[in-house]
Amino acid sequence: MSKISLINDPRNEYHKLYTVDKLNNMVGGVPIRYVNLPSSELKKYTAISIDNNVPVWFGCDASKMGYGPDGIYNDAMFK
């Protein structure tokens, strides 16, 4: 089964292929590429994967809403 990484980055144009400079960690490895999609499409494809018992990995940048030393996450903590 082939896999593809999908992202939602509203700063960049949707339905295009992107990569992150210096993200690869293996000499001669395959570059990591992402397809940038609107959130509604990410939701659609996530549901399809889950409905077909295919695991979904999720990551997000929420570091501004957490305090790592205490393991606290609160989106209103630093307002």
Image: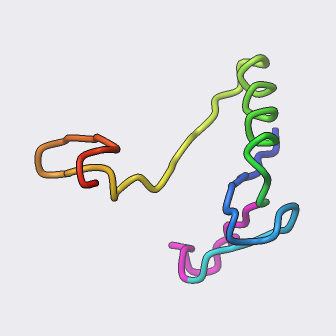
Q: Nearer the viewer, residue 31 or 18?
A: 18
User: Residue at image x 69%, y 55%?
Assistant: 8
Residue 74 as seen in the image, left or right of residue 11: left
Instruction: Confirm whether the magenta stretch covers residue 10.
Output: no
Instruction: Confirm whether the magenta stretch covers residue 25.
Output: yes
The answer to whether residue 79 is above or below residue 54 is: below
Residue 21 as seen in the image, left or right of residue 46: left
Q: Position of residue 20 (x, y in %)?
A: 61, 76
Residue 9 as seen in the image, left or right of residue 58: right
Q: Position of residue 60 (x, y in %)?
A: 50, 51
Q: How many marks?
A: 0
Q: Position of residue 77 (x, y in %)?
A: 24, 47
Magenta range is 22-34
Q: Nearer the viewer, residue 30 or 4?
A: 4
Q: Quadrant of the C terminus?
A: bottom left
The answer to whether residue 7 is above or below residue 29 is: above
Q: Quadrant of the N terminus?
A: top right
